Amino acid sequence: MNESNENFYLTQTPIKKLLIKFSIPCILAMLVSALYNIVDQIFIGNSTAGTAGIMATTLVYPFTVVALAIAQLIGDGCAALYSISLGSKDEKTSNKCVGNAIISIIFSSIILMILGFIFMNPILNVLGANGYDLRCQEFTKQYLTIILYGVPFYMFSSSMASIIRASGAPTYSMIATIIGAIINLILDPILIFGLKMGVQGAATATIIGQIVSAIVSAVYFVKPKFIKLSIQSLKIEWKVLGRLLQLGISSFITQISIAIITIVANNVVGTIGGENATDAGGALGIVFKVFAIVLAFSLGVAVGGQPIIGFNYGAKQYKRVLETYKLVVISSIVIGLIAMLMFEAMPKAIISLFGGHANNLEFYKEYATLSFRIYLGGILFCCIQKASCIFLQSIDKPYKAMVLSLMRDVIILVPGVCLLGLNGNLYTMLWAGPISDIGAFVVTVLLVTIECRKIRSLCKKTEPITNEVHENEIKGRFVISIGREFGSGGKYIGQELAKRLNVKCYDNELLAKVSENYNIDMQMLKKMDEKQKSGYWYSFATNYVFSKDGEVLPISAEDNLFLKQAKVIEDLYQNENCVIIGRCSDFILKDKPNVISIFIYSSDINFKIHRKKDLENISISSAEKKIDTIDKQRAEYYEHFTSRKWGDKNNYEICIDSSKIGVEESINVLENYIKNRLNEVSEVVL
């Protein structure tokens, strides 16, 4: 697919269809990423390591989140810049940012791994391991030591997932992530229980899965879908890298905030928990991981919408930007409500999945239950706030996205946990969760409302000329006839021209008029519409028709379906301005004044193939076959009834190759031509 196809696909395909296509793979990829650590916790929790093992993975969790934060800083920032650049037709920047992202993530991941080994003990102290019992401390060190070896692979695959998704391959991005998770899931019980490796087995299974995901992600860039990588694009350009990092700062802060609050909570619990510290920390660890699953759904929808919002924002299709955000928010509300109801109604069922090996089992279950009900009580508001951060990032508002990302976890939650925890007890600190969710939601509403108002004002500036202006520009009656090759975008071009000229577009609507005027079954008409002149069904339809009541009615050859359709076209010409798609309308109205006949074609067969493939979600071979079949049918239909060659430039006033200038530019060219052409003859009395 070239740039024109991509422009058509992301700026014209229905938003719901696009959001589903991009979000489902994204949700699954994020869900799988969240499950990496959770799967380890479930197996470890059901082993002899118990809550000490769970707490070990909880203590290491912030370090892996820091790695993810850096990966998303680069990956999500690159994805946002790539989408915006592609939407504004800046191909050089779109390719350059991908090359810079690849080099940056490789170097930064290796540096983080080396620092992890060098500063192992200080890192364990910062994570809060020294506040827990010796058994837990030993498990934590074992787990972190092995996890460090997988950091470069984990960061590379996580970063590339966003870039691959933004380049138009969300399914591949999902597959790359899921493969690693499946391997981790298979190896966990084998290494933990079969080979009796315990916590070390869980860590080993995790990094093996991460290595496989990284390899699969790297393979994509051997022949990427739309990205054009070169040696030049791999050279760091600080201006591009700087803008990339600006756009990714929101994602970075979102993740780093999770790491900060987890570290703070672990340290507070270790300080005030006493003999119950390990059990309380293990309970909170479960809550944090389940919270990550909910965010995988909410952020998955938002990140799935990111390339749609970013591309349309760059292409100045502002109504589609707002429509996408609206659907993202609705999805977040549904996800948040379901999660909130589950946490309030059935927390014990969730807790039971993680095993019951605890020092004080009764306290552990009670604290875990209250943690779900209180700490995650404002999950609905949190889902909306997190999704809105991605929205601000997508419309090139990195600093506002950064403020919003900091608001919940750093500005409100961290002080809340410290104040309510260190000055109270393990139970009062839980209320910091809903307080921060509601506070951050209020700020979200304020910031997003301001930006949405700005976008609405941009909508008004970029809207097509109003009906009144159109009426003043084009005087008198006119009809625009559109002939088109299948896959060239002719139907869409006709529909958009009709909107800009403030008239109706007749495609299937023409069949509906024939059906209504002559009492012919609509399904029969659709089956015969612009079909070839030979074959059983055509022969039957030109001599017999079904009425709406199902009755078979004989008709003469002179009074066949073509003539009925031609009569409707002539009536339209006499009664209203309009755009008519196909049906030999150029021939039927060839002697009428103020009729502009247009033919849309594509000299590049791949343009048509990939466009139909993506719009109809079919294979390349199916799209190619469908194009060949329908074009042959249209040619035979046209040539049979007109005795003229279909697509011959001599039959039309203007012919446009949509693959050369793109669908959108074709509309602009034709709109200007039609206005100039009709205004020149506006004095003609019809």
Image (spheres, rainbow, N blue to C red):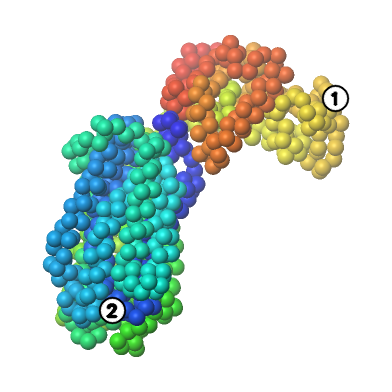
Residue pictured at 24% horizontal, 42% vertical: 103
The N terminus: image quadrant: top left
Q: In front: 466, or 498?
A: 498
Q: Is residue 576 visible?
A: no
Q: Position of residue 679 (x, y in %)?
A: 48, 16
Q: Position of residue 415 (x, y in %)?
A: 18, 70
Amino acid type, residue under disc 2 in the picture? Ala
> Tag 2: Cα neighbours inside 10 Å, few (<14), some, or many (≥20)?
many
Please tell me in which quadrant of the rendered image residue 438 appears. bottom left
Residue 217's place in the image compared with 536, above or below, is below
Residue pictured at 44% horizontal, 68% vertical: 338
Amino acid type, residue under disc 1 in the picture? Ser
Residue 47's place in the image compared with 587, above or below, is below
Q: Is residue 349 visible?
A: yes
> Tag 1: Cα neighbours inside 10 Å, few (<14), some, or many (≥20)?
few
Q: Which mark is residue 556?
A: 1
Q: Which of the marked residues, 2 or 1, is nearer the chain's N terminus?
A: 2
Q: Position of residue 34 (x, y in %)?
A: 36, 62
The C terminus: image quadrant: top right
Q: Left or right of 602: which side holds 567? A: right
Q: Which mark is residue 52?
A: 2
Q: Left or right of 480: which side holds 196? A: left
Q: Left or right of 672: which side holds 37? A: left
Mark 2 residue element: helix
Q: Which mark is residue 73?
A: none
Mark 1 residue element: loop
Q: Left or right of 135: which side holds 592? A: right
